[in-house]
Amino acid sequence: MRPLDGITVITLEHAIAAPFCTRQLADLGARVIKIERPNVGDFARKYDERVDGMSSHFVWTNRSKESLTLDIKAEPAQDILKKLIEKADVLVQNLAPGAASRLGLSYEELSQINPKIIVCDISGYGDDPENLGPYRDKKAYDLLIQSESGFLSITGTEQEPVKAGCSIADISAGMYAYTNILAALIERSKTGKGKRIDISMLESMVEWMGYPLYYTIHGEAPPQRTGSSHATIYPYGPFPTGDQKQVMLGIQNEREWQSFCSIVLEQPELAQHEEFINNTLRSKNRSSLYKIIVQHFDKLTQSEVIERLEAAKIANASVNEMKDVWEHQQLKARQRWTEVDTPIGKVPTLKPVGLKDDADFYIGAVPDLGQHSANILQELGYPDAQIQALLEQKVI
């Protein structure tokens, strides 16, 4: 039995934050009904065509869901929505700020239909009607939230701030939505009542900024932008090897520094050099130390450097590309890859993190647009003739 078997989630979602949240609920066994615009769908369906014509973003965040096309602004759609809400446990939405309320989908209105429903609103800056704030109506995309939260100010090089390579603001908001919904389901099992959850992308990212915020709490300078290297610990970062690859490594203490000099660099005397005798000096003189390390690594392959780092018990990692991750021996050894059905056939997918046994999770197909519309309406009691009429009216 899966943890969320028997739980039904209705979602009006697009892009990444809400779909990532609800996909994880589906992984745990929840039935997720994804409402999409007729003929258009979630605009993430068109972000790219890299998965044999399908969007990489959409395939990633939408497995195990049912797609119901519905023009939620059309009058006949209101009865469909009402019937769905009556039977639902959770509603998730990341429409534009205020849109859900204008459509009659606020928690206050939905709880009149179903007092046990949990409503999770995801927005850029928060959409609590009792505490809107001046940024409530600002458009919010992942990069904009990375910028607004201060993340860009500490990421990149001295010359230029750089965004994260994946949608971390969306992912963080989706994770907090997911965990808050799980907590609300536990709370409801004790109180019998639903609740409203207000997830802000900005607040989700600022929570992740705890270290740099406290680092500057009394007005001190923020952590320097040092690319892939650590701002205050050295050596800590990527170093090129003689076969045009890179190795990431991190020295955490003086014992490791001495071991690094003796076993990896084969220069034990370097550990006591006056410019490198402690981490503060190594960080201050990182430019000259970098040259020494690179000069030695240039004579070795990536594998040889990693072999020495392992012998010295120095934390390290390969700087992998995507093709390397697909073939990662650790993921294969732990049997973490499986397959998921899509409209274009099976594609590989990672099993839900932390779940081992197939009985603990569910991996269903990535849905085609509107694939489940007729079945869902039949389940709600609509006859075939009425379903056909709704289709002709472009309501579904």
Image: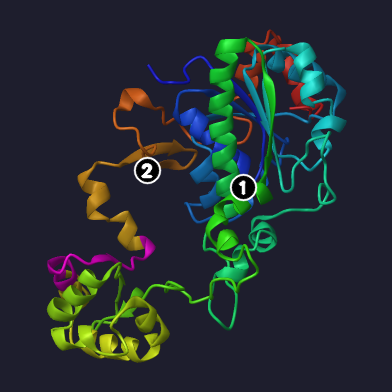
Magenta includes 212? no
Q: Is residue 220 visible?
A: yes
Kindly indicate the quadrant of the structure image that contains residue 198: top right
Residue 55 shows in the view: no
Q: Position of residue 168 (x, y in %)?
A: 55, 54
Furthest residue toward front:
218
- In this rendering, is residue 94 above or below 119? below
Q: Residue at x 55, y 64 (%)?
A: 215
- The quadrant of the rendering that contains the C terminus is top right
Residue shown at the point (42%, 40%) measured from the top left: 345
- Tell which circle, 2 or 1, labels the residue nearer the N-terminal end: 1
How far is the residue under mark 2 from the one under mark 1? 24 Å
The kind of residue on which mark 1 rests is Ser
Rendering coords of residue 2 (x, y %): 40, 20
Q: Which residue is mark 2?
A: 350
Q: Quadrant of residue 38?
A: top right
> Vertically, is 254 above or below 272?
above
Nearer the observer: mark 2 or 1; the answer is 1
Q: Which residues are magenta?
A: 307-322
CA neighbours of label 1 inside 10 A, class few (<14), some (14 to 19), many (20+): many
Residue denoted by label 1: 204
Q: Is 381 or 303 nearer to us in this picture? A: 303
Which color scheme did the rendering employ for the protein? rainbow
Q: Position of residue 28 (x, y in %)?
A: 45, 27
On screen, 286 above or below 389?
below
Foreground residue among 224 and 184: 224
